[in-house]
Each structure stands twice: as structure tokens, then as C-alpha cells.
Image (cartoon, rainbow, N blue to C red):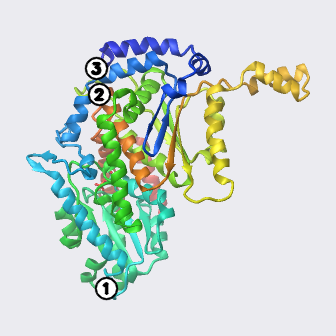
Amino acid sequence: MSSRSQLASWQALQQSANKMKEIHLKELFAKDSKRFEQFSVHIPGLLFDYSKQHVDRNVLQQLIALAEQCDIARWREKMFSGEKINFTENRAVLHTALRNRANTATLVDGKNVIDDVNAELAKMKVFVEKVRSGEWLGYTGKAVKDVVAIGVGGSNLGPQMATEALAAYADETLKVHYVSNVDGVQIASVLAGLDVETTLFVISSKTFTTSETMTNAQSAVNWFLGTAQQQQYIAKHFVAVSTNLEKTAAFGIADENVFTMWDWVGGRFSLWSAIGLPIALYLGFDAFEAILEGAFEVDEHFKTAPNEQNIPLLMALLSVWNTSFLGHKSQAILPYDQALHMLPAYLQQGEMESNGKHVNFAGEVVSYTTVPIIWGMTGINGQHAFYQCLHQGNVIVPADFIASIEPQIDVGQHHDILLSNFFAQTEAMMTGVDAEQVTADLTAKGKSPVEITELLNHKIHQGNRPTTSMLLDKVDAKTVGRLIALYEHKIFCQGIILEICSFDQWGVELGKGLASKIEAELLDDTITHPHDSSTQGLIAYYKQHRK
Ligand code: F6P
């Protein structure tokens, strides 16, 4: 038995889960007229309503007791103060230092990292202003019009998600394009529309060894030199974001064009570092700083709010409750805001790469399900795709519904129609429609008793499907910072409660290593490695049939 499941609160929650499975959410609302007030929290810019989650006051207390027995406050302090809590890689976890607007001294190996952070922010600001003002000139003396950001995973998803979320605020100064896939179709189609003389490349890779990014970066250089011809011009068109100065230099990028980050910034938590450079280029440095400010507000909330009012902690506890106790193995992220359309993909990496593990701190196999499968898309489109299953399928999928009160762009009645769907869906998922109601509706429509009997079971909606609703004031830079920081701290708390080391990703390394071996086999027929018969057969078939 793993140590968490031996805790008194864990065992109490197991018993509560058995009881709660018998109680419909509707009954919880009927019993408690103050349910919305009791189970919702407001912070500047955001209302968090978890009253449609399958908890009552007793379960909430038990969940908070679990957090306390897991020493969440002590672990939080360790993270913020720079202790090496990523113990499998011997690293601090300090993405919060990147947005520490109060400049609180934070030591790693005796060095105050805040000084380094501020120096790098200052360097970014100068660069961004030069590029955006037209002072930074390409090799033929023209200003930059297009930025191509090359990177993958954490070096892509955060910047691209934020760029899409805030595109409504961008001016005409620059266009930003993202290339993450090693499928050549992506880079070819991005470059097809661009002018070598006015294009700036940002190569983002913490390690500067990721094969996909390096391949795309090399193709970008080849495309550039195809016209510019001379190697020396690379300095005017290529910058990098990385911890690996040796590799960036070997690649041909001048040191002054490298923006650095540190090993205490995890890839999937890196958008606050120079990895966010494309966002700053696109929207201006002030907007980038507003994102940092929004996140800093949430850091302060996370550090100081009491447990019952602490949104990231509540988000984590609800996730653990749904996944590890109620057995719901999937979680949907459903933004009712087009600007947030990449949020599900971003959070998929954040949560699944962090907590998709099966052993606890001591390396013992855990007895409970850790992370749920995170998925989703914008709510309205989802309604016409997979919501049928959310309403009537026999797999229950807890969902986060996210909407904004004020639209980024006001177009007639659109926003009220959008929000009426947002409210209706969570209500329908909670209440459902019982046999009595279906019978009454069909009778009112003039159906005969025989027809009603035939249709009855098809039209019953059990309801009882847990959802959380988040209402943002508006999707702007600060709100994006707040929202991402809430989920980051949720992931951290979830990891501590489940005893998962959230900050490594050994599983990703396994596939990467194997791919590089196979790559050698594809490029050179004399190289062969032993494989299972399926992999062997697939490789042979590919080599036989490729042109
Ligand atoms: O997907 C695995 C991963 O290691 C991520 O954690 C990381 O964000 C991504 O690859 C990119 O790594 P890098 O920034 O070093 O290119």
C-alpha cells in the first residue's frame, strides 16, 4: 500500500466516495440553499464556482484534511523558496521567480536568481522594442515584419496559446508564426508566404538538442541562406532561447542573440521566461509584463488564501477526488471563448506530462489512479461533437467550463448566445432529465403511451455529472497570466497530494531515445537494431515503399 492511501483522511474519503456515489447532485442542491455561496470563490478577475462538483461540506473538510496531512503548506514553501523539489533531476522549481514582481530574493545554490531574471527581462525588453520600432534591421536594411518561432512542447505550447488568446490586442507591427512539428509540411507552409529580408527566427529550446526543433531550425537556416547566401547575415535574422550556450554557438547563433533560461524552469512552466519572447514581440513588452503580473497575483493568492478559499488547492483536491476516489479517469477542459482555443492542448501537457506517473516519491507503485486524461476543445464546437457522450454516455467526464463576461470583440448578440450555452450545459449535466419529466414532455407533445414507452429510456438524462465553472472578467493579458498560474499551482498541489514528482518527464525521454536509433536505421541501410516483429515489419515496409 502506498503511503498516501494509509492516511486517515484518505481512508475517510474512500468511505465518503461510496456514500456520495449514491447521492445525486440535485439532492445536494435541494438540501443546501447556500450551496453556490458555500462552494464558490471570487478573486480579482475571476469567479470559481465548484458547487456543481460532487462534494458536500463533509467531503470538502476531508479533502482539506488530506491536503494538510500531505503537508501542502510546507511543500509550497519549499517550491517558492527554491529548494530542489525536483529531486529526480536535483533541480529547484522556480517558475514563480520569473514573475516575482515584488523581487523577493530567491536563492538557488547561494545565488539570488531574481537578479538574473530581471537582467534577462531587461534584455528582452530592449530587443523587443528594437524589433517592434523598426530599429532592428535585417541584412538588406529592412525592418522585421514576420517572426517565426520554432520550438516544441513547453517551448511552443505556452507562447502559441497566449499569442492566440491575446491576438485581439495585437497591432499591425508584426506577425508571429509557430513551427513545432517536424512534419516538413508545417515549416514549408509557414515559409512559403514569407520574405527572407523581413523575417526573424526565434529558435526556442531549453536543451537545444531536441531533434524536431533542431531539424526545423536547420531547415530555416537553409531557407534563409538560399537567398541571403552569407553566413554572417544569420546574426541579423536568428535569435535563440536556451540554457545551452555551447549548442547555440555551435549552431551559429551569436551569443548576444541568445536569451537564457535556467535549469530551474521546467519546459511546460517556461512561458514566463524568455520562452515568452514571441508573445512579447507580437503584443509588446507591456502586455508580456501584464501576463507576469496576473500570474504573480495568483502566486500571492496561492501562498496566502486559507485552504477553503484557495482556488488552485481546491482545483487539485477536486481532481484527486474525481479521479482517485470517484474513479472518473478523464477530465475535459471546455473554454467558451474562441481566444482560449489552445488552452486544452496547453493543459494537456501541463497536467499529463507533470503527473502522468505511476510511482510515489519513494519509487513505490501507487494503488490509485494519478492523472486523468485531459482533453477538450472550445465548448460550442464540442457541443456539436462529443457532448452527447458527456450528457448520456456511461463514462462520466468531469469538466472545467471557462467563459468570460466581457467579449474581446463585441458582435451583436453573439456573446449572450455563447454564454447561454455555457450556463445551460452545466445545468443540464447536473440536473439531467428523469423519467417523469420525459413522460410529461412527450405527453404534452401528444405522444401515445406506446410511443412514450418506446422513447422513454432514450430520452432519460441521468445528470449528476460534475462540472466547475470559471467566469473570467475578460480574456486579457492579466487574466491569461492568472488562469495559467491557477492551473500550474493546481498541478503542483495534485502532485504533492498524489506523491508524484511532477517536474521530471522520463517517459518522454524513452520514446526520444528510441526514435533517434530508428532514425539512423532509416537513413543508413547498414545500421540495424533488434526490434519486435511488428516494429521490424513496419520499418521494412516503409523502407521498401518510400520513394
Ligand atoms: O516533450 C518533452 C519535452 O522535454 C518537454 O518537457 C519540453 O517542453 C519539450 O520536450 C521541448 O524541450 P526543449 O525546450 O529542450 O527543446
Local secondary structure at mark 1 = loop
Q: Which residue is mark 3?
A: 69
In the rendered view, would you say 423 is above or below 70? below
**Disc nearest the viewer among 2 and 3:** 3
The amino acid type, in three-letter code, at marker 3 is Gln
In the rendered view, would you say 114 is above or below 383? below
Which of the pair 281/180 is nearer the observer?
281
The residue at 27%/48% (across/down) is 95
The residue at 37%/68% (across/down) is 281
In the rendered view, would you say 59 is above or below 232? above
Mark 2 nearby-residue class (10 Å; few <14, some 14–19, many ≥20): many
Q: Position of residue 509 (x, y in %)?
A: 29, 45
Q: Are marks 2 and 3 in contact (CB under 8 Å)?
A: no
Q: Which residue is mark 2?
A: 499
What's the CA distance linking mark 3 and mark 1?
61 Å
Q: Is residue 186 left or right of residue 204?
A: right
The amino acid type, in three-letter code, at marker 1 is Tyr
Q: Which residue is mark 1?
A: 139
What's the CA distance linking mark 1 and mark 2?
53 Å
Image quarter hosting the N terminus: top left
Mark 3 nearby-residue class (10 Å; few <14, some 14–19, many ≥20): some
What's the CA distance linking mark 2 and mark 3?
12 Å
Q: How many marks?
A: 3
Which of the pair 37/9 is nearer the observer?
37
Nearer-N-terminus badge (3/1): 3
Q: Position of residue 353 (x, y in %)?
A: 36, 41
Nearer-N-terminus badge (1/2): 1
Which of the pair 446/34 is nearer the observer?
34
**Disc nearest the viewer among 3 and 1:** 3
Mark 1 nearby-residue class (10 Å; few <14, some 14–19, many ≥20): some
Local secondary structure at mark 3 = helix
